[in-house]
Image (tube, rainbow, N blue to C red):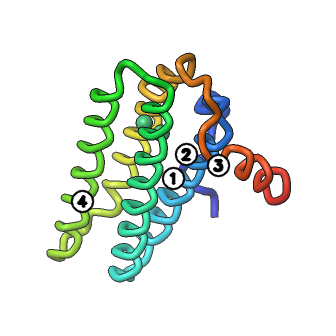
Amino acid sequence: MQPFMEWSDNLNTGIDVIDLQHRKIVDYINELHRASQTIDRDLVGQVLNGLIEYTASHFAFEEEMLIDNHYGEIDEHKRLHQNFIERIKRHLANHEKGANVARALTGELQIWLIAHISKEDQRYVPSVTAPPVGSAVSKMIKRFFG
Ligand SMILES: [Fe+2]
Ligand SMILES: [Fe+2]
């Protein structure tokens, strides 16, 4: 099956570890799309929980990196991350109450992610000079499994 969302090179920040994490979020959105095509509500819940957990850990990693690099707009960036997590959590709560949220949510996630990466994340790129923690590891992973 054709994936719902494909990675596009103009989303690359050039910071390998960040690009790998962003691609993984795209994978989760595709997984949610696949789950939404089924009638398996437990699967949708599992994927949504995984997506929230992974996205929150990406945000925490990114914010650490921005603090290390003394990024001036960190508070605003953190607020955008926070709002996003709260939004997906509301969808999860609605899913748990029995609503069908997955189909509409995949589109919403796609739009948010593309807008956030191409505007807000790209904006910090010139300020990031210190290599983020784990970048050597992520390069290795990419070389062997990429
Ligand atoms: Fe971000
Ligand atoms: Fe990001």
For the residue pair 129 and 81, the one nearer the viewer reads as 129
- Which one is in front, 134 or 24? 134
Residue occupying the point 25% across, 35% down = 79
Name the residue that disc number 1 marks: 25
Q: Which residue type carries mark 1?
A: Ile
Residue 134: assigned label: 3
User: Relative to residue 4, is residue 82 drawn left or right?
Assistant: left
Helix, strand or loop status at disc 4: helix
Sequence-first tag of 4 and 2: 2
**Label 1, residues with CA under 10 Å away: few <14, some 14-19, many ≥20:** many
Name the secondary structure under disc 2.
helix
Q: Residues within 10 Å of mark 2 (few under 14, many from 20)?
A: many
Gap between marks 4 and 3 measured at Cα: 28 Å
Q: Nearer the viewer, mark 3 or mark 2?
A: 3
Give the residue at x 63% y 64%.
Answer: 1
Q: Is mark 1 within 8 Å of ligand 2?
A: yes
**Nearest to the observer: residue 16 or residue 3:** 16
Gap between marks 1 and 4 measured at Cα: 16 Å
Determine the secondary structure under disc 1.
helix
In space, the residues marked 3 and 2 are separated at their CA atoms by 15 Å
Residue at 47% x, 29% y is 121
- Reading the chain from its start, which is encountered first: label 1 or label 3? 1
Q: Is mark 2 within 8 Å of ligand 2?
A: yes
The residue labelled by disc 4 is 89
From what the image shows, is residue 140 above or below residue 98?
above
Q: Are marks 1 and 4 in contact (CB under 8 Å)?
A: no
Instruction: Kindly indicate whether the residue at mark 1 contacts the one at mark 2 (C-beta within 8 angstroms).
Output: yes
User: Can you say whether 144 is above or below 133 in the image?
Assistant: below
Q: Quadrant of residue 72?
A: top left
**Residue 141 screen position, x and y as percent:** 76, 56
- The quadrant holding residue 89 is bottom left
